[in-house]
Amino acid sequence: MTVAAPLILNVDDNDGARYAKTRVLVHAGFEVIEAATGQGALDQVRTHSPAIVLLDVKLPDISGIEVCSMLKRDPQTRSTLILQTSAAAVQSFDKVRALDGGADSYLTEPIEPAELVANVRALLRLHCAEEALRDADRRKDQFLATLAHELRNPLAPIRNAVELMDPRYHAAEDAVRDARMIARRQVEHLSRLVDDLLDVSRITHGKIALQIECVQVDAAVATAVEANQPFITKKQHTLHVNVPDKACMIYGDPIRVAQVISNLLSNAAKYTPEGGVLELDVSAADGSVTIRMRDNGIGIPSNELADVFNLFMQSEDSLARSEGGLGIGLSLAKTLTELHGGTIEAFSAGLGMGSEFVVTLPMVVQQAAIEPEPATLGASANAAPRAQSADTGAAGPPAGDSAAGSAAGSAAESSAESSAGSAAESTPESAPESAPGTRRRVMVVDDSVDGAESMSILLEMLGHEVRVMYDGAAAIATASEFKPEVVLLDIGLPGIDGYQVARALRAEPATAGALLIALTGYGQESDRQRTRDAGFDHHLVKPASLDDIERVIAANGAGGVPRNPGTTAQPDAAQPNAAQPDVTE
């Protein structure tokens, strides 16, 4: 892939001087645009966003020092690097004023070509470092928001399960038993998330430990397949596994080798549409074992391919975040592979073209050799290696998200179990009860089976008529017949996301007046703005308490307030008794 030359804006009102500097920079491989006035410089920066502005101090309309100050005050242009230039006659006071005004460097004419190029390259290195820091900061913010979402998701069905087990509700024995199972599954899911984060910490501090022994690769493959089979079956994928008849042996940690394979398999299963084809091939040649994981899924954009193994890397593509992910699985796979002396590569022809990940590990040539005593690689750690399940966090295609997979454990199955449901703990003296005349037709839309079912049971116990849907398309199709008065709608749905569902419901006369409540793990202000723009009436952050949900339903004229399809619905702020449980992060 061809990398574009850095863009430099050369600003000088002297045609000869401007031409000379442009010629030097173009010869050095830079792309150059020009301006002869201060206003022209401001316009060019805002239009073309150059990496560096080579800015003469003396300009006919606005001084270069003032242009620099204006660019540095503007949030949109303040990151642009400024190399100020001036004639030799300029006093040192003016140089100080220029640097204090925001210039990143200063050169006095006449400027030697080599000196000019060296200064520009030095500033570009600074520019790249600053961009890397900004990118890391963006990823940190995205990761923290995603982590909050992923922790809230299992908390929602856990809270619902606790409500169901409350004696006040007099729930049937079967319902209580199911609630215990829901809570157990989601606690296991939370435990896996914590384990994944601990692995990240160990990697960051160089303390991930490997217990080395002779590992049979086909056994590691079998472990990884078993861990991911429930999720593969759920998505109706066809999985082809090909291993050599003769066993392939490597020296390594059997749990971590299986984790690498599990991460790749979970990643492929998550980001391949239902009914896809996954191929896991193992081969041995020239002293190496090669493991190939291929899929016919959504593929990886070319501009993200080089970054797929970066920690916390997640694609911005779509709300396929319904499949979850913290953006650490592929990074873990790469680190673990390299600790075993191997390599890992990613290939994709682009979006919609599927992906292939190739792991190469050194093979035990003499398989009859005496196995070494268990040892550790990397800085030592007290924690023993463990079976780790596939990452079930939130977001994006293989390019950013992958499974933090697991050798033993119920892996990706729980990514479909991350939930609808409940937030600030409340302990009323008696079970909430729907006020007379407030029983509603309620549709619960969530791809988390545990979250949706537990919420449905609770709402039915309050007297509501409830219909449960697990994806956006089914919700839209059912709404025209069911005519819900209230819709509890998750955002990160597979296929058609919650925003699209909300707009579709607002556009239909039968559901245009329904009370739309976003019930989601995303709670930042930008998320709330998006739900408002999509036509939601309320934005509740998981796990939302049943009391809060019931108060919102009771306080709003569900089914009785005509709305204009496509408009932004506002919460009932005017009603003094209306619940305001829109919990912020």
Image (tube, rainbow, N blue to C red):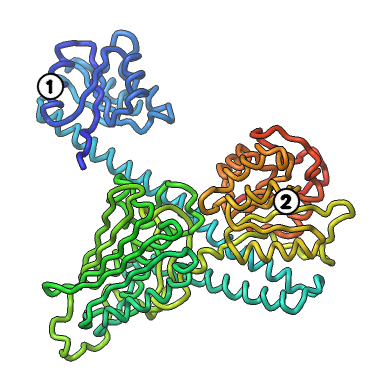
* 563 vs 49, nearest the viewer: 563
Q: Residue 25's x, y, as percent?
A: 15, 26
* Quadrant where the image shows the N terminus: top left
Q: Which residue is mark 2?
A: 482
Q: In the picture shown, does residue 27 fall above or below 489?
A: above
**Sequence-first tag of 2 and 1:** 1
Residue 474 vs 263, above or below: the answer is above
Vertically, is 62 above or below 243?
above
Residue 201 seen in this snapshot: no
Apparent side of residue 341 relative to residue 299 in the rendered image (left or right) = left
Which residue sits at x=21%, y=89%? 371
Labels 2, 1: front one: 2
Q: Tell me which residue sits at (32%, 51%) in the image.
A: 353
- Give the image quarter of residue 403: bottom left
Tell me the quarter of the picture where residue 528 sits.
Answer: top right
What x and y, as percent, mark residue 248? Answer: 21, 80
Task: Give the labeled residue for mark 1.
Answer: 23
Tell me the CA gap for discs 2 and 1. Answer: 71 Å
